[in-house]
Amino acid sequence: MMNPWLPEKHKILDIIKETDMESTFVVEYDHPSIQHGQFFQLSLPKIGEAPISVSSFDDHCVCFTIRRVGKLTNVIFDLQPGDDLFIRGPYGKGFPLDEFKGKHIIVIAGGTGVSPVRSTLHHYLSHPEECKDVYAIAGFRDAERVLFTKDLEAFESADHFHTTWTLDRGEKEGFKQGFAMNFVKDIPIKEWNDNDYAVIIVGPPIMMSTTAKECMNQGVKEENIYVSFERKMSCALGKCGHCKINETYVCLEGPVFPYTKAKTLMD
């Protein structure tokens, strides 16, 4: 992108309804590579702009899983395949997958936090040679809020994946009851060397904080934990200061942070 402030018009290729509040928008995109965990700024003229995490991508498209929660997203949800969406990015730092090579990978996500880790899980699904195995825990509020059902089934069927899906309340076949953090104890962390695993936690701030603490209670070293969060990001270029915490610009240094840094930023 020549001008980082200028959104570019891209065609919507498909819209996949996930729940009654969330849909995945598949957008035509063939620019330079995206890092797993990065975000884009999505906009519509005269309506507004908002940061949205990448939930999947390939050489020809990028996917955004969007919740209908406000003025901009309400209008985006009125769009159809073939319509245009304005995007700029990608921005921020993603997950350091090169550092994770050859390790046990633990991914714990809550609710819409599954979206920013979806592409990472797909990466390990397609590249089992890059990890020892994957432990994936995803928690949802109830059966009506479950995202990416087909993806969850694909992860379940992979020989190198160990999966746990949970609901805060209610029941659904194949799902356990309780919070995602409650099942960290089932991962054989204490059998591994400290440099043999990496932990990714994504969800609401309180979920990430409590889950990270539970991981450490189970023997995880805090330097092995990575989290992702968005905080009042606006310009995505470190100029407006909306996302600034002390001297840290979340849009530039995040949204992915090592927990050693993130623990000083969480409210």
Image: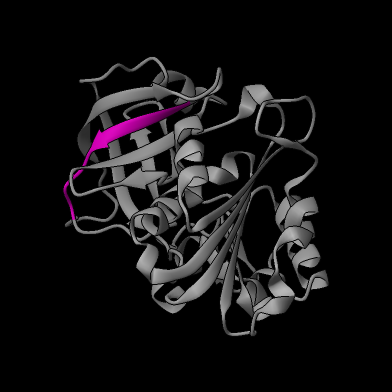
Quick check: can you spot residue 267?
Answer: no
Instruction: Choose between 110 and 84: the one closer to the eye.
Output: 110
Q: Which residues are magenta?
A: 23-31
Instruction: Choose between 92 and 179: the one closer to the eye.
Output: 179
32 vs 103: above or below: above
Quick check: can you spot residue 231?
Answer: yes
Q: Position of residue 203 (x, y in %)?
A: 64, 49
Report whether 124 appears left or right of 19.
Answer: left
Colour scheme: one colour
What is the quadrant of the N terminus in the image? Answer: bottom left
Report whether 85 appears left or right of 195.
Answer: left
- Figure quadrant of residue 38: bottom left
Measuring 58% from the left and 75% from the top, which residue is drawn there? Answer: 197
What is the quadrant of the C terminus in the image? Answer: bottom right
- Figure quadrant of residue 96: bottom left
Of helix, strand and loop, which mostly describes the magenta segment?
Answer: strand
Q: Position of residue 236 (x, y in %)?
A: 42, 55
Q: Position of residue 99 (x, y in %)?
A: 44, 78
Measuring 54% from the left and 22% from the top, which residue is drawn there? Answer: 19
Measuring 78% from the left and 35% from the top, which residue is drawn there? Answer: 168
